[in-house]
Image (tube, grey):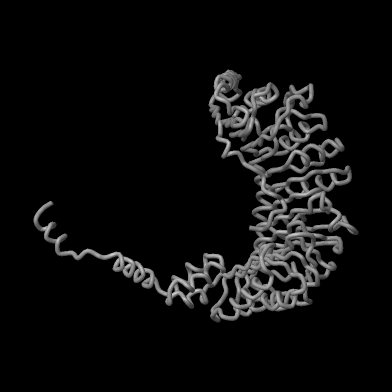
Amino acid sequence: MDLSSAIHNAERPKLSIVDKIDEDERSITDLGDALLGLILSYLPTKDAVKTSVLAKIWQHQWMSISNLEFREEAQDDRALFVNFVERVLLLRESSAITKFFLECGVRYDSSRISSWVSTAVKHKVQELDLRFWEIREPLVLPCCVFTCKSLLQLKIGQLNEIYDLRVPSSVCFSSLKILTLRRVRFPDDYSAKTLLSGCPVLEELNLIGCCWDNVKAVCISGSRLKNLTIKEMCIKNIGICYRHNVDTEFVICGVKLEYFCYSGSLNHDYCFSRSSSAVNVSIESELRDWILHHRAFKLLMGLSYTKSLHVCLCVLVQVLSVSREMFSRLPVFSHLTNLTTHWSIWFYNDLGSREGLVAILHNSPCLESLQLEGEYFDSSYAHEGYEWNLDPVPACFSTHLKTIEISMIYGYKEELYGIKMFLKYATVLKKMTISFDPVGFLAPHLLKRKLEIFERILSFPKGSTSCIIETHFPAITEVRTSDDDMGYME
């Protein structure tokens, strides 16, 4: 240490613990009320209010928060929860509310809850998220909700059973971009039409487990609509809402969707008009009736402009295996470049699953990427005739198909045969990626088996001399788990 630095350090006074605390407090104070309010807005409202006891400067700081979250737990004291909500809404400053989240039991307080929602609307709320349970009397949302000019996102739903949504005669969401309805039931066709047609700038529509037993037809349109998700009620809960009418017709017209997702058992009829299209499509369906197979086929017929298609086993298998004349009626997916489906389709051929997939491959001349997702595979249930050939070979295999990804394989002979066939027929293939099941190769002594399988795959003859084969053994934490289809709308 030189002399100048020593003198400098000697002249600098040491701060006591009290001085350091004061210095820290001054640094927090210097952030300013606006920034402090922003920080508190990211906390649950209960925690934000608690900061009022920290110091005098914090006493009223929470009153300017822009995000309000009120979440009632089943074990909460009802009176305390109600008093807390009303105290916050009463004492809060008159500034705008960015997000208002309310999850609570309704019981016999529907008028009180309606007034809370009205207060949020009066403060020009931008995001309104309402989740109800234990509704013992009709809950009618205030009319001002349906004409709120500041609202950008609206989520309405019931956490159990069905919420009967009453729609006023006049609906005008002039700024609404995202609408999510969960387990909602409309009283009639007019209510559904009034709500959906009152969103002229809507970009995302999510219909999760809704009940349509009072509605004969639903028209989904909008020049700005980009994302559409429809998830039907689970089969086990079908008695809750599909008591009367299970034949609601959904017509998707005049939209250019970037993403369309459907999940359910096709209890209703879905149709894309010729003026509509969807770039990325995901269809998950469990078909239980022969008539419903034709609904799935009708849905596929409207997806000829799709670029990326994720379709589950049931749709591919059963739609095309019910009636062979459907093969010739399939549309040409001239824009399809990416197809994702189940890997096991190639092994369980008792329902014609393989033929169904091959038919789509033949009608996808520009397919560049094929993704085969793995699932639990029991080789004892595989069809005896697991060996197959592509005759004739789909045109895309020799012109466009550049990548094949296969996930979660176990190394069974049926799987290795499938890999061998793909390497044989895909003559312009650039890369094949194979991911092994991490659980099946968890034990250290299975390392030798891993290497043997990999060496065997490398020995397979390849139709493309430039093809690279990559293998992965992902960690267990990397294995994807499916989300609950009926989970809420985050």
Which residue is situated farthest in the left direction here? 3
Left or right? Give the position of 107 relative to 61.
right
Q: Quadrant of residue 99?
A: bottom right
Percent of width and height locating residue 232: 78, 53
* Residue beneath the point at 66% across and 53% down: 259
Foreground: 165 or 79? 79
Percent of width and height locating residue 456: 59, 19
Percent of width and height locating residue 326: 84, 39
Which residue is situated farthest in the right direction here? 244
Foreground: 246 or 23? 23
Q: Quadrant of residue 135?
A: bottom right
Foreground: 263 or 476? 476
Is 124 above or below relative to 9?
A: below
* Residue beneath the point at 88% across and 42% down: 290
Q: Can residue 154 be seen in this view?
A: no
Percent of width and height locating residue 392: 74, 27
Is 315 above or below relative to 217?
A: above
